[in-house]
Amino acid sequence: MGITDSPRLTITPTDLHVVVRVGDETVADSHRPVVLEERGNPTRYYLPREDVRTDLLRPTERHTTCPLKGQASYWSLDVAGTVHDNVVWSYETPIPEAEAITGLLCFYNDRVELRVEGHNTL
């Protein structure tokens, strides 16, 4: 059972090794992701900021609202002079049921190379 475990949303800290690459650049490398599973959506890996190359992030004006998590803020990635728009997001002040992802960063799985290794759940 995760920190949050409801019929529609499960949030679980893990010790999986998650590596995110864009082109030849590693933009994130973490052994402490928080896995979020939401019915109808792909599994998402929320990473601590310390494990992400935040020097490559550029804040954007984009914001979205999810009834299960709250309001998300977005960043673009600037890698080797190429900007990848709105590819990273975070819930800075999520609703209480999703507070386990507060401030963590997440990447669109289909817009980066996201590799997950290991299988142990804490």
Image (tube, rainbow, N blue to C red):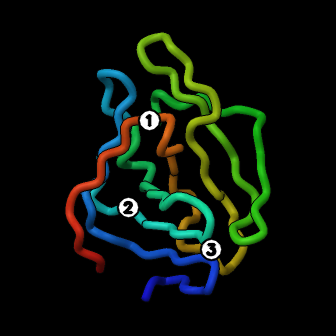
Image coordinates for residue 17, horizontal then vertical, percent? 25, 56
Q: Which mark is residue 98?
A: 3
Q: Residues within 10 Å of mark 2 (few under 14, many from 20)?
A: many
Query: Which label lies toward us, 1 or 3?
Result: 1
Q: Which mark is residue 112?
A: 1
Position of 76 compared to 3: left or right? right
Quarter containing the N terminus: bottom left
Q: Is residue 35 above or below residue 74?
A: below
Residue occupied by mark 2: 33
**Amino acid identity at mark 3:** Ala
Q: Is residue 39 above or below residue 59?
A: below
**Badge 3 element:** helix
Disc 1 from disc 2: Cα separation: 16 Å
Position of 59 compared to 63: left or right? left
**Amino acid identity at mark 1:** Val
Q: Where is residue 2, by image quadrant?
A: bottom left
Quarter containing the C terminus: bottom left
**Amino acid identity at mark 2:** Pro
Image coordinates for residue 45, horizontal then vertical, percent? 44, 57
Query: Which label lies toward us, 1 or 2?
Result: 1
Position of 64 compared to 108: left or right? right
The structure residue drawn at horizontal position 29% and vertical position 77%, both measured from the top left corner, is 121
The structure residue drawn at horizontal position 38% and vertical position 49%, both measured from the top left corner, is 50
**Badge 1 element:** loop
